[in-house]
Image (cartoon, rainbow, N blue to C red):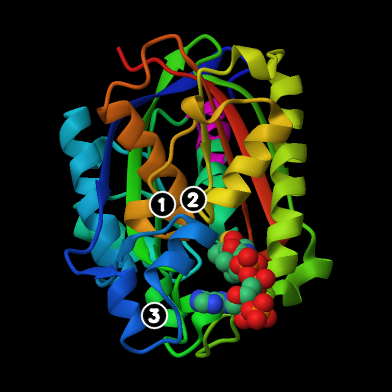
Amino acid sequence: MTLIPAGTIGAKFLGWGTALPPKVVSNDDLTKTLDTSDEWIRERTGIERRHIGGSTASLSIEAGRKAIEMAGVDPLSIDALVLSTTTPDRTVPATSATVQHGLGMRCGAFDVNAACSGFVYALVIAHGLIAMGMKRILIIGTDTLSRITDWSDRNTAILFADGSGAAILDAVSGPGQLLGWDFDADGSLEDLLYADIGKTLHMDGKEVFRRAVRVMVDSAEKSLKASGLTANEIDLIVPHQANIRIIEAACKRLDIPMSKTAVVLHETGNTSSASIPLALFDAVDNHRVKNGDNVLLVGFGAGMTAASAVIKWHNS
Ligand code: ACO
């Protein structure tokens, strides 16, 4: 690849797609096996139902295929696949290899694991690859958290679910859509949320909640500063869909009204890597985003990772 001087080449979204497993599990369904209630889950999390099923590869292929079809591109013209997931189908090989083959692509492919911040990590990595000379990249955020959830633990079973979101990023001359971004992680907090290999998730929900608000706000402020924009100039914020109370608290501190916030968690639960693309493309498909809008993506997750990006939406 030819190295291109920084800033002379950027990227834009050319197509996107999402996938949710057909099986829907309501809060009432969970009350059959857990000591909980629909009212408690709605009030404390905002979640009403979630989609469960599929593998990380199958959901990624479904979302990726939709993104490729919408972009109208040949899978063989894609230069790289970056798959964000914290629930790979196998330890070896990377699930991106299965997805690459399933989509009829022939290019470099790798997984990124930054928990629920992963899609933003993948987005920024893709921009970096494009700045280094690649022309077209497929990024996918997929998780099948239901496979590592202990369904007898009401602390986690009410939250986690499955889904996927994918996008084709194409090189454009000029700076492109990405105006500012930020990554963070604090491995000293790994015991707040973890799953050992072959085991289920353990979470200190209260402490994750407390820190989530702080790291989201901190990361979003760094991206805003890098972009040269103020919170006032953001047309839509797309936060990680973990808990409506975390979203409300973070938006309040950022001084961004809930009317400018993309929320799908009542339908999806917490889908980790898929959460930001599911919320972003739901907003775009529902005409909540127009060309020229400033969109702030911000995620946090196990590790304790955080990532944010300010993009200027242009898809025409
Ligand atoms: N149903 C009914 N009652 C419950 C449930 C439940 N599912 N869970 C807890 N309770 C009870 C508790 O036992 C407690 O009862 P007590 O007052 O008699 O002791 C009471 O409800 C309050 O419990 P809290 O733990 O204080 O509830 P909280 O309001 O903190 O909500 C929750 C818990 C939803 C887990 C919240 O802390 C949270 O969302 N934390 C963040 C989790 C998160 O975002 N994780 C994902 C990170 S991203 C990633 O990487 C995947």
Task: Give the prevailing secondary structure in the magenta stretch.
Answer: helix
What residue is disc 3 on?
147
Q: Residues within 10 Å of mark 1 (few under 14, many from 20)?
A: many
Identify which residue is drawn at 55% across, 42% down: 120
Report whether 225 appears left or right of 32: right
Report whether 6 appears left or right of 57: right
Q: Residues within 10 Å of mark 2 (few under 14, many from 20)?
A: many
Image location of residue 71, percent across then percent down: 22, 29
Quick one: SS at disc 1?
helix
> For residue 241, which numbered disc appears in the image?
2
Residue 49 appears in the picture as rendered: yes
Quick one: SS at disc 2?
loop
Callout 2 touching callout 1 (CB < 8 Å): yes
Which is more N-terminal, label 3 or label 2?
Answer: 3
Residue 143 within the magenta-colored segment of the rendering: no
Quarter where residue 169 is shown: top left
Region of the chain picked out in magenta, as a range = 125-133
Q: Amino acid at mark 2?
A: Gln
Identify which residue is drawn at 58% across, 12% down: 8
Per the model, the C-alpha gap separating discs 2 and 1 is 5 Å
Identify which residue is drawn at 32% across, 54% down: 267
The mark closer to the camera, 2 or 3, is 2
The mark closer to the camera, 3 or 1, is 1
> For residue 265, which numbered disc appears in the image?
1
